[in-house]
Image (cartoon, rainbow, N blue to C red):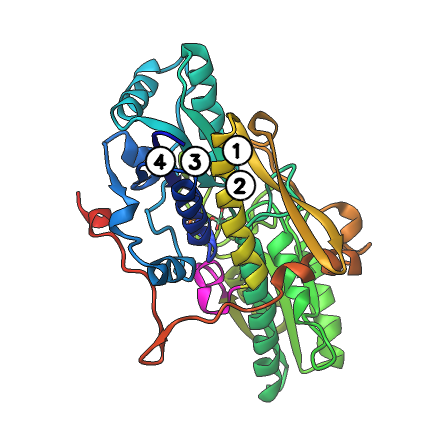
Amino acid sequence: MKKNVIVGQSGGPTAAINSSLAGVYRTAKDRGANKVYGMLHGVQGLLEERYIDLADHIKTELDAELLKRTPAAFLGSCRYKLPEIHENKEVYERIFEVLNKLEIEAFIYIGGNDSMDTIKKLSDYAIITGHPTRFIGCPKTIDNDLALTDHTPGFGSAAKYIGTSMKEVIRDSFCLEYSKGLVSIVEIMGRNAGWLTGAAALAEGEDCDGPDLIYLPELPFDLEKFGDKVRKLLEKKTSVVVAVSEGIQTLDGRYVCELGSSVDFVDAFGHKQLSGTASYLASYIAGEIGCKTRSIEFSTLQRSASHSSSRVDILEAYQVGGAAVKAADEGDSGKMVVLQRLSDDPYQCGTEVKDVHKIANDEKLVPREWVNEEGTYVTNEFISYVRPLIQGDVSPVMVDGIPRHLYTPKELSER
Ligand code: F6P
């Protein structure tokens, strides 16, 4: 590389997103990039010329190692939707003005399906205007819903957290006995894709039966049938544990979380904030059955738990960061790095690049055949697909008994 690289992070953060950033930085430097800039809060910040020189923040090998172990987007994230090119050319002119000023050869964006929309539009604009900057997407999302890639960095660590915490919740729920029983409902992220919710089944093993029921958003949710199912289970057991996706919808297409208190926040991509499903269902069961209930929302914990991240995930996140820079350096643009699983046992995975136009704004859902007939649990095929992705640990760097992270750039919180 002869000139400079700029990298941004966008969308919901993960425990592995900064490992990709570390991979981008290292590879860009190894390939001769002069400067590696980090846009603060993605393209939204770039429009305001908010960026840092990563060399000021990753000074030593220890900094790079800490970065890999630091959750949330080190550079700050955004949910900014670029307008269509014909709708507002000024936005693109502004972005390319900044890219020209910084002499950017490669633009790497670490994100999910909405962020790939940004790569698609910017690479299209570069083609239309004959601009030489190359644009490459680097996959990231706990939701695991990106098309054309076997899985996405960030998913493995979140799945590991969910399997582990689910197991701990199940243990806890059995130790106290309530006269009419206890129903614990655990709400898991993933929006319209059930990959993460299905990962609750990872709790199952020799020492744990796993959750009793798992409801993915891919299938309509029947409230009455759910109540009957729980009632029947309580005839045999003192404790019932249910995993539900935040995105489950009733038979008439309403999000269950909207049945309770109203949720008004909608982001730039038109996504409603989904939260409150477990709490609604816990109240429903308490009302119908009169038993003790508990609602548990893993919420941001599931995507920020870097103290229990998966080694496979952190290594792959680093690898895709490097592969993105390599692709740009070799002349690719308008592409996203994908992970190609080569084998399950031993688990082997490589990288390729695919056309981002076939990925942006799409959602890869859990196949119907990976959910049981009744729609209340995932199959063994599902579990075999996820299990390799949660293997191994990355030891946190502990200081005074608490994991140490790379400090946040002070520019991030400045207005
Ligand atoms: O897209 C990743 C994700 O974590 C989803 O699973 C979840 O619905 C969403 O982000 C939550 O986003 P926010 O933190 O902006 O509410």
User: How far apart, in angstroms, are the residues tagged by discs 3 and 2?
Assistant: 11 Å
Where is residue 24 shown, x and y percent of the image?
Answer: 43, 44
Q: Which label was assigned to residue 323?
A: 2
What residue appears at the point 72 percent right and 55 percent down from the top-left corner?
385
Instruction: Name the amino acid, label 2.
Output: Ala
Residue at figure coordinates x 43%, y 39% from the top left: 31
Q: Image quadrant of residue 363?
A: top right
Of residues 131 and 385, which is closer to you in this image? Answer: 131
Ligand 1 within 8 Å of the CB at mark 4: no
Q: Which mark is residue 108?
A: 3
Query: Does mark 2's beta carbon lie closer than 8 Å to ligand 1?
Result: no
The answer to which of marks 2 and 4 sits earlier in the sequence is: 4
The answer to whether marks 2 and 1 mark residues whose Cβ atoms lie closer than 8 Å is yes
- Asked whether 169 or 236 is in front, the reply is 169
Q: Residues within 10 Å of mark 3 (few under 14, many from 20)?
A: many
The nearer-to-camera label among 3 and 2 is 2
Mark 3 close to ligand 1, CB under 8 Å: no
Q: Which mark is residue 6?
A: 4
Q: Amino acid at mark 3?
A: Ile
Give the distance between the C-alpha atoms of the residues marked 2 and 4, in whole angstroms. 15 Å
Q: Report the span colored magenta.
A: 297-309
Above-or-below relation of 127 to 18? above
Pointer 1: what residue? 327
